[in-house]
Image (spheres, rainbow, N blue to C red):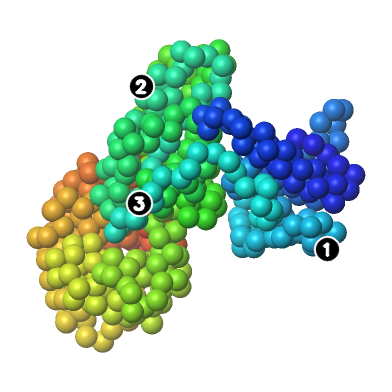
């Protein structure tokens, strides 16, 4: 970290450093090159002895993480101050939401031919699969204890296993991701090389008998941070700690990936939507949880089912939306709505196989309409076996005045005011 009295001097220094590193790396073997990322921000700081703190410093650190190796990222206030005073361009990377920073920050990449990274040539890009995809990179061991490498590697394997239980998620195998072990990687490049949309990376630090693990979820297409968390435990219960972290990570990541996929799908042209895209658009969220939203969701799901009549999650979600219509009194044709909901739920169970979300949705519908509560509970138990980070489903008889669960998240922990099937987190 370096502090400057002039933001112009700070950016000029950053550019000269990256130019100098590019020149030095030109004659160095690719595996021995050193590439820097630099972030520059302008803001107030708190000075304590020989250190500085504050949001200004935190934003600079986040900007550094967004930069590519050999690159520079700056905040909007920096761009505005220096754009007419230095001979370099700025590429708009849009607003980014950083952890512990109240407001989004507009980010710009500094454009300069001499600052482009000089690491190994990129491998051929792989196309993204037809469903959400993620790669878990080897965790960095920053404890200085080489013997902790086994623990860090084991932690990654446990997380990969936990994520693999999410049936709608494509997870890259360990053998592919561990080729990046020990490297300073660019997540955007890794995303292109492995053909994934999301990257999970982390670090491990050990002090005495305490272990701290930090993980963060990154959008490999934009480099934006979607989620980060820290876990602490003791080495005397290694396997229990690994299980706890793996399940916690999977449980936290699933709703965030789902929300990111909904937002990404909503931006795609309607004429290119697949059945999966239509399904994502119909997922419950604050914008759709009204009568008009419910009807729109059913229309989207109907089109998805036309694309694929055996699409279990779409069938189950259509049934779930019909339950919400009944519970909220949004239809005059109660009997018809009831029959269609039960038919959809049963069709979903016939084709959903071991999809935990479809099983949970179908269970909620059957119980909500009073078909078979015990059978519904068995479906929820099966859903939990397949994915320990399942859902909380509001179950209430139509017309009983029950309020549905908060639809903000599919993994919401809000309670309905009626009977419910509670699916606890692992």
Whether 399 is drawn above or below 245: the answer is below
Identify the image quadrant of residue 104: bottom right
Q: Nearer the viewer, mark 2 or mark 3?
A: 3
User: Separation of disc 2 and disc 3 at Cα?
Assistant: 35 Å
Residue to which mark 2 is pinned: 239
Residue 300 horizontal side relative to residue 353, left or right: right
Helix, strand or loop under label 2: helix
Sooner in the amino-acid sequence: mark 2 or mark 3: 3
Residue to which mark 1 is pinned: 84
Q: Is residue 43 visible?
A: no
Residue 395, numbered label:
none
Residue 106 horizontal side relative to residue 353, left or right: right
Quarter of the image with the C terminus is: top left
Helix, strand or loop under label 3: loop
Image point (45%, 71%), residue name:
267
- Taking the view exactly as shown, the residue that stands out farthest to the bottom is 332
| Closer to the camera in the image, 113 or 186 | 113
Image marks 1 and 2: residues in contact by CB distance under 8 Å: no
| Closer to the camera in the image, 181 or 118 | 118
User: Separation of disc 1 and disc 2 at Cα?
Assistant: 57 Å
Residue to which mark 3 is pinned: 126
Sooner in the amino-acid sequence: mark 1 or mark 2: 1
**x and y percentages locating residue 110 in the rendered image:** 69, 54
Image marks 1 and 3: residues in contact by CB distance under 8 Å: no
Sooner in the amino-acid sequence: mark 1 or mark 3: 1
Quarter of the image with the N terminus is: top right
Image marks 2 and 3: residues in contact by CB distance under 8 Å: no
Q: Mark 1: give few (<14), some (14-19) or many (20+) Cα within 10 Å.
A: few
Q: Mark 3: give few (<14), some (14-19) or many (20+) Cα within 10 Å.
A: few
Helix, strand or loop under label 1: loop
Q: Nearer the viewer, mark 1 or mark 2?
A: 1
């Amino acid at each position: 970290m370096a502090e400057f009295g002039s933001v112009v001097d700070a950016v000029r220094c950053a550019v000269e450093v990256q130019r100098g590193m590019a020149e030095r790396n030109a004659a160095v073997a690719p595996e021995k090159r050193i590439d820097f990322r630099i972030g520059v921000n302008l803001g107030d700081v708190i000075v304590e002895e020989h250190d500085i703190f504050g949001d200004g410093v935190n934003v600079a650190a986040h900007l550094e993480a967004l930069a590519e190796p050999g690159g520079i990222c700056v905040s909007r206030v920096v761009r505005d101050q220096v754009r007419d005073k230095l001979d370099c361009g700025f590429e708009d990377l849009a607003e980014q939401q950083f952890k512990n920073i109240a407001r989004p920050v507009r980010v710009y990449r500094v454009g300069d031919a001499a600052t482009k990274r000089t690491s190994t040539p990129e491998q051929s890009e792989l196309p993204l699969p037809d469903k959400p995809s993620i790669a878990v990179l080897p965790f960095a061991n920053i404890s200085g204890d080489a013997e902790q490498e086994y623990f860090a590697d084991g932690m990654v394997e446990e997380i990969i296993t936990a994520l693999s239980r999410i049936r709608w998620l494509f997870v890259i195998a360990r053998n592919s991701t561990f080729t990046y072990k020990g490297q300073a990687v660019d997540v955007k490049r890794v995303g292109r090389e492995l053909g994934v949309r999301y990257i999970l990376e982390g670090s491990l630090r050990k002090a005495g008998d305490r272990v701290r693990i930090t993980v963060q979820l990154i959008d490999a297409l934009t480099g934006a941070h979607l989620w980060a968390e820290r876990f602490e435990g003791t080495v005397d219960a290694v396997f229990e700690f690994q299980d706890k972290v793996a399940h916690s990570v999977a449980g936290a990541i699933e709703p965030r990936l789902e929300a990111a996929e909904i937002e990404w799908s909503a931006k795609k042209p309607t004429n290119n939507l697949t059945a999966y895209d239509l399904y994502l658009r119909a997922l419950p969220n604050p914008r759709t949880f009204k009568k008009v939203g419910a009807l729109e969701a059913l229309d989207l799901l109907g089109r998805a089912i036309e694309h694929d009549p055996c699409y279990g999650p779409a069938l189950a979600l259509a049934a779930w939306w019909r339950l919400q219509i009944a519970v909220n009194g949004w239809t005059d044709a109660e009997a018809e709505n009831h029959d269609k909901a039960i038919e959809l739920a049963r069709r979903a169970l016939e084709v959903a196989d071991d999809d935990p979300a479809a099983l949970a949705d179908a269970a909620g519908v059957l119980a909500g309409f009073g078909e078979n509560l015990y059978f519904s509970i068995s479906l929820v138990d099966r859903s939990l076996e397949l994915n320990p980070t399942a859902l909380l489903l509001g179950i209430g008889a139509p017309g009983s005045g029950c309020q549905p669960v908060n639809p903000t998240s599919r993994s919401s922990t809000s309670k309905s005011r009626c009977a419910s099937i509670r699916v606890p987190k692992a």
